[in-house]
Image (cartoon, rainbow, N blue to C red):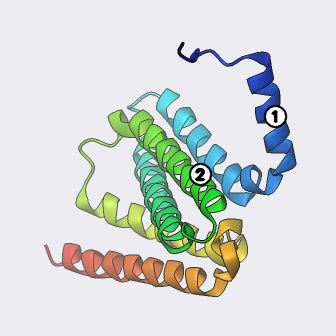
Amino acid sequence: MHASLVPTANDLADLVAYIFGNPYLFISSSTVMTTGLVLGAAAVSMVPRSAPVIRIVAPPLAMLLTYFGVGSMVLATEILLRFHASIPDPSETQFASGVGHLLAAAAGIAVLAPHLRARSRRTWIVANAVAVAYWTVHVVVLTPPWFAFQGQLEVIRAAALGALATGAVVSAFLWRSARSD
């Protein structure tokens, strides 16, 4: 006997009960932001390729999604490696959330892909700077709730801001070297 791939009414009811029983895991600034980024990517993909807005919006949106996907997966992996031995279920849940965020980011980038070709080096440098600025504000103002997993808020926030500072330095260095070309 093998399980059906189609969820039953009980499966769906259990899922809804789990979501309502654990809203902090699903509804947060990160969830709202992820939804907004993916919807933004979908909206941008519907604009004709020749529209000027595509040249302006698509690269920074792709960089935002890249930082989001990679950052979510790095944090989810850190949580799994650090806490799995002592609290397996919550650390696995956070890891699954990280995978979901990575997949959502990848989907958004895939939707944008046709609009990302043949962009200049400077466009990508500016896109990176925009993404770094956005994420810095997001981390400082709307700190994602899973940064605080098991009391590690200050360490994770410092690590995230350090990574973003590195991204800013890279943008500045690349911008400076692009001006001399």
Disc 1 marks a residue whose amino acid type is Val
Say which element carries label 1.
helix
Q: Check the image and name the residue furthest to the left.
A: 181
| Occupied quadrant, residue 181 | bottom left
* Residue type at numbered disc 2: Ser
Can you see residue 51? no
Q: Which mark is residue 43?
A: none
Residue 83 in sight in this render: yes
Residue 172, compared with residue 143, is above or below; it is below
* Image location of residue 144, percent across then percent down: 67, 67
Residue marked by disc 1:
16
Q: CA distance from mark 2 to mark 1?
A: 16 Å
Task: Using the image, determine if residue 68 lies above or below residue 108.
Answer: below
Place of residue 114 in the rendered image (x, y in percent of width and height, measured from the top left) = 34, 33
Comparing 67 with 42, the one in front is 67
Give the left or right position of residue 35, taking residue 125 as reference.
right
Residue 49 or 89: which is nearer the viewer? 89
Q: Find numbered disc 2 in the image and state the secondary structure of the residue it sits on.
A: helix
Taking depth in this image into account, of 43 and 162 the one nearest to the observer is: 162
Residue name at image x 57 percent, y 80 percent: 156
Q: Residue at the spot x=58%, y=47% of the render? A: 37
Quadrant of the rendering where the N terminus is positioned = top right
User: Which residue carries the number 2 mark?
Assistant: 97
Relative to residue 140, is residue 46 depicted above or below? Answer: above
**Where 13 falls versus 168 (above or below)?**
above
